[in-house]
Image: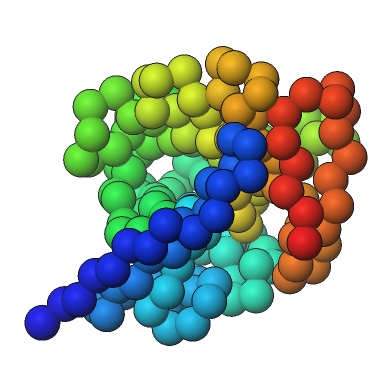
Amino acid sequence: GNKQVHETGFRNGEIALDLHYNSMRLTRPFRYIDRNWSHTLAKRILTEWAAPGHMSSAETRPIAEVSAIYVQNERAELEVFKHRAPLTGVFQSTESVGVLLNYIAAVGSTPPRWELSRGSGVREIYDRAGRLVQIIDPDPAKTLTLCYMLNELTPCVAPTGNGNHLTE
């Protein structure tokens, strides 16, 4: 059978880091602690561009040809998003009403990214490889920015001095 455990981790201001265990975890290649443990910030979008080690691979299909995207939550559970025709790069949750995932193409020097909107005003921003890079809350004190250098979290530079910036 499946065993699940949810442990409260630590709190630092508005940043919470909790641990989650799932003995039948389906996304083991994207583990963050070991084969079955995950954590609050381990959310990610699983795409054909994602590769183990958090590095993106070469694009193999244009976004217009992608029919489904999987989003892993902090408990390592998967939610399926289906392409919302006729819009290119827009995917709708098959489990939750009003939850949308948008692929935002590169513009100038701004890299491509994903934006997940759950309808509560909170937006989650993911890089092209599917890594969570920012949680934007209507309350700037609850906004969190994550920065990566290769496979590790690295110091972030606060553009406005507002919000939280997680570093390792």
Q: Residue 114 is drawn in which quadrant? A: top right
Q: Residue 55 is drawn in which quadrant? A: bottom right
21 shown above or below 46: below
Asked whether, in this view, residue 108 is left or right of residue 6, the answer is: right
**Can residue 34 be seen here?**
yes
Look at the image and tell me in which quarter the N terminus lies: bottom left
The x, y position of residue 112, in whole percent, is 69, 41
For the rendered model, the colour scheme is rainbow
Q: Identify the residue shown where x is 38% and y is 20%.
A: 119
| Depth check, front residue: 70 or 27 | 27
Q: Identify the residue shown where x is 39% and y is 53%.
A: 73
**Can residue 104 be seen here?**
no
Look at the image and tell me in which quarter the C terminus lies: bottom right
Q: Identify the residue shown where x is 31% and y is 57%.
A: 78
Q: Residue 15 is drawn in which quadrant? A: top right
Asked whether, in this view, residue 71 is left or right of residue 157, the answer is: left
The x, y position of residue 13, in whole percent, is 63, 37
14 shown above or below 9: above
The x, y position of residue 155, in whole percent, is 85, 52
28 shown above or below 134: below
68 shown above or below 19: above
| Depth check, front residue: 127 or 124 | 124
* Number of residue marks: 0
Asked whether, in this view, residue 31 is left or right of residue 53, the answer is: left
Q: Identify the residue shown where x is 64% and y is 29%.
A: 143
| Depth check, front residue: 111 or 32 | 32
